[in-house]
Image (spheres, rainbow, N blue to C red):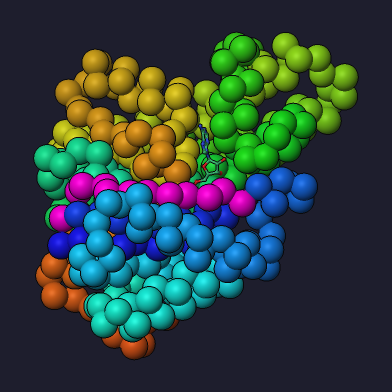
Amino acid sequence: MIVLGVETTCDETAVSVVRDGRDILSAVTATQMVHAEFGGVVPEVAARAHLETLPALHEKALSESGIPEDAIEGVAVAAGPGLLGALLVGVSWAKGYARARGLPAIGVSHLEGHLFANRLAYPDLEPPFVALVVSGGHTLLAWVREWGDYVGLGQTRDDACGEAFDKVAKLLGLVYPGGPAVSLAADRGRPDAIRFPRGMRRQANFDFSYSGLKTAVALHVSAHPKLDLAERADIAASFQEAAVEILVEKSLLACAQLGVSRLAVGGGVAANRRLRELLVDAERKRSIEAFYPPPALCTDNAAMIAAVGDFYLSLGACSGPGLAAVAVWPLWPAGKVFPWADPSRKLD
Ligand code: KG4
Ligand code: ZN
């Protein structure tokens, strides 16, 4: 099946054409740099930018795919979670295009897209595995029993990991978007220069917390008003170490608890070089196999959305005219959580 995917959940506008859920024929992404001057994504500005960019991007994805337009057999759109105005642009576009061409359309979860990026990158990857989705909006661990069947293990209690990267970038006066900038600065710093807190390390569940780490960096910066370049690099490296170390630690704990040997990572922060180093380390030291897509498939893209769409459309699912944007859309259904996700559990 050849599926056209559309992604407009936040500040990336993306369109992609994917064959059989695994073969990317084209993938175009435009990042909205217009938010740089505000230091963060402005929802209304994002929606308008999607509206301006989408038509040309759609044409580009079609022409770069090298297939005739009538070879497209289905349309998939990230219908949530995300910014409502931004979502509405992509959903309306996908619905309109599908209707005009008489194609089935399906709204899919952006978070499931981040999981499916691994299926694109590793066509032979099959569940069960533990999935870590770590982005600007989410930080969660799920047990993927089958494609489409997810059990919640844990998630952040407050800020997302990527959000913390963006905030620290701002504190250090680095450019937007913050994650890659902090990572670059960290390359020149010492990860053990400052001991920042690892959120929820002592709790024997799979939840995360980044607000304490964020505050610790803010306090450190305000206590040292005249930071030179080397000191900023040390802060970036020490923050990054704390931020990604706990991700790997909790992911490995989840693998051990479930007796699962495969760990798949997705979302923008999965592009982080230090995180990937720690995963390689874990592979060497423990008997786990780590999967992490190339950076372009970690950050928001439409190929992952087309891949999810292919999966469900191939099963005969279709959203129909009721396809709507869903701002809040959890990855796992209510109640489908592993007992260890119980927040009252604490280490003795
Ligand atoms: O998945 P994504 O593109 O969008 C969301 O679904 O949120 O993730 C974006 C987040 C941002 O917070 C960005 O700063 C972070 O991913 N990010 C990174 C890196 N590249 C992107 N964080 C750390 N290191 C990176 N190399
Ligand atoms: Zn994302």
Disc count in the image?
Answer: 0
x and y percentages locating residue 105 in the rendered image: 29, 76
Image position of 251 with respect to 97: above or below: above
144 and 297: which is toward the camera: 297
318 vs 146, left or right, is right
Q: Residue furthest bottom?
A: 321
Region of the chain picked out in magenta, as a range: 20-32
Quarter of the rendering occupied by the C terminus? top left
116 and 2: which is toward the camera: 2
Q: Residue furthest right?
A: 226
**Image point (47%, 69%), residue name:** 90
x and y percentages locating residue 205 in the rendered image: 37, 45
Residue 55 visible, this angle: yes
Principal secondary structure, stretch drawn in magenta? strand
x and y percentages locating residue 311 in the rendered image: 18, 62
Q: Residue 305: name its quadrant.
A: bottom left
**Image point (37%, 31%), residue name:** 248
214 and 325: which is toward the camera: 325
Image position of 227 with respect to 173: above or below: above
Residue 157 visible, this angle: no
Q: Residue 291: name its quadrant.
A: top left
Quarter of the rendering occupied by the N terminus? bottom left
Q: Residue 211: name its quadrant.
A: top right
226 vs 299, left or right, is right
**Image point (45%, 44%), residue name:** 299
The reply to whether the magenta stretch includes residue 21 is yes
Image position of 101 with respect to 194: above or below: below
The reply to whether the magenta stretch includes residue 85 is no
x and y percentages locating residue 20 in the rendered image: 16, 55
**Image point (63%, 37%), residue name:** 178
